Image (tube, coloured by chain):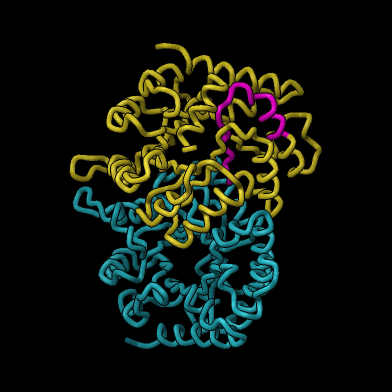
Chain colours: A cyan, B yellow
Amino acid sequence: MTFQEKLQRAQQLTRSCVCVGLDPVPGRLPQPFQGEQSVDGVRRFCEAIIQTTRSVACAYKPNLAFFESLGPDGLRVLADVVAAIPEDRIILADAKRGDIGNTAEMYARAFFETLSCDACTVTPYMGRDAVLPFLNYPGKAVFVLTRTSNPGAADFQDLVTDSKPLYLHVAEQASAWASDRPGTVGFVVGATDLDTLASMRRQFPDTPFLIPGVGAQGGDPVQVMQAVHAPQGLVLVNSSRKILYASSGSDFAEAAFYEADTLRKALNKKG
Amino acid sequence: MTFQEKLQRAQQLTRSCVCVGLDPVPGRLPQPFQGEQSVDGVRRFCEAIIQTTRSVACAYKPNLAFFESLGPDGLRVLADVVAAIPEDRIILADAKRGDIGNTAEMYARAFFETLSCDACTVTPYMGRDAVLPFLNYPGKAVFVLTRTSNPGAADFQDLVTDSKPLYLHVAEQASAWASDRPGTVGFVVGATDLDTLASMRRQFPDTPFLIPGVGAQGGDPVQVMQAVHAPQGLVLVNSSRKILYASSGSDFAEAAFYEADTLRKALNKKG
């Protein structure tokens, strides 16, 4: 099964293109987890979030930074959290790695074999050496950062060479590298710039987009889906903090479900 | 003590600007470590390399990919390895992270607080949000990828906007971000393009350079030092595989010392 087929099935099953970002911060865990050891609290919190949102989320995106910051136990917690995600959902390691050949191979092995993730994010600054090693895993995919949703994105991604911004050079090159391995490359394109999102979709109609920037960052889900108007298997819309921290009380799970389901419904609206 | 002062002292102490890159691959460990559990072998191998090279190396650069690929135990091994590095040497986490605000803060905490490293590498694609959080730690530094030494480096780093390649935009911006925190930003500049190295040094005479690409990648140490002709505290020349895997036999430690010391002497030659 290709990555895109697995994504399509997960989206059919859940009628959702919501990806829940797992960015657990020990100090922000809801009340029921306060007073626990950080690592236990993070593990149990993430497991509870997965349990409550699984019917309305097609994918989960653990952000590795938040697990690594827990120290050596963090990666063990990450492995437990990944194991709690249903097998028929997409698991996306948000790692934003970008390193050369033999190092990229190590990362690919860590994410796809050791952790059994379906996809991961990579940063393209170092060029093809940073991306190609991830394309050797059948059924897996890599999401290359193109135009991100953060304030500093414009610093370099919008620099224009030969009438094209850097992010478009990145997207074109990454597509070319994967030309003989269709479906193995996706793009990260932020929800905060709808014009860019729409023009990227016009130019890459068959490429899966991972779209951060709705929720806490302010992108509008209905407008996002109008910009990318995509059939199943081509769009993952991520929300992290707005779902995870929907309530700081003992009703955190219900509140997280409500936020995820509200996003799901907004994304499914015909604009 | 600033990062640069610590680097200067380490270089005076060892009369060396050699940085030993720690990229341990279980399958490539010398004969004495074969047949051990991977994690134990990697730990003992790295400790032996540090022990044998400490008199001729001012810095160690563990590459996180190689530890992460060992699974959850990998970060525990990394913590042990970091603890084996003498306190008066530089510890540089080669992580090439690049993520936005709150995630970058997590990484900064992981490397500078949890692991007690002196510096780390970052990739600049996401812009200022990916770099600024690392500049809030007195005595620590961040090395921003500018022009790297790998074959794919030219894919994007050499794209020219307003008569300047991307890597120069990155270097100028990163310097500007650190203008009120001198000494907290360094650049990664590959040894494989001597002209770029020399022109970068002319433009940034006071910025520490981390220079990969000698050793297995073929850059010539004498020519590198002619290109950067720098006083102490401004150059770290990294070699990884050529030192680590100098011999696959029981003489691996002597062979590693010989390679590191040979590189040290070549770098100290007046060209």
Residue B18 place in picture, x, y as percent: 53, 25
User: Can you tell which quarter of the image residue B247 is in?
Assistant: top right
Question: Does B230 sit above or below residue A151?
Answer: above
At x 30% / y 65%, what residue is drawn? A200
Q: Nearer the viewer, residue B271 or A17?
A: B271
At x 35% / y 43%, what residue is drawn? B155
Tell me where the magenta segment starts and ends, as one range. Answer: B45-65
Question: Does B43 sit above or below residue A109?
Answer: above
| Image position of B70 (left or right of B199) | right
Q: Nearer the viewer, residue A208 or A71?
A: A71
Specify whether residue A142 is in view.
no
| Image position of A151 (left or right of A126) | left
Q: Nearer the viewer, residue B52 or A195?
A: B52
Question: Please, which residue is most extreme toward the right here?
Answer: B35
Image quadrant in which the N terminus of chain A is located: bottom right
Number of numbered callouts drawn: 0
Residue A58 place in picture, x, y as percent: 53, 76
Residue A62 place in picture, x, y as percent: 56, 66
Question: Please, which residue is most extreme toward the front here?
Answer: B1
At x 58% / y 57%, what residue is drawn? A69
Question: Does A174 sit above or below residue A237?
Answer: above
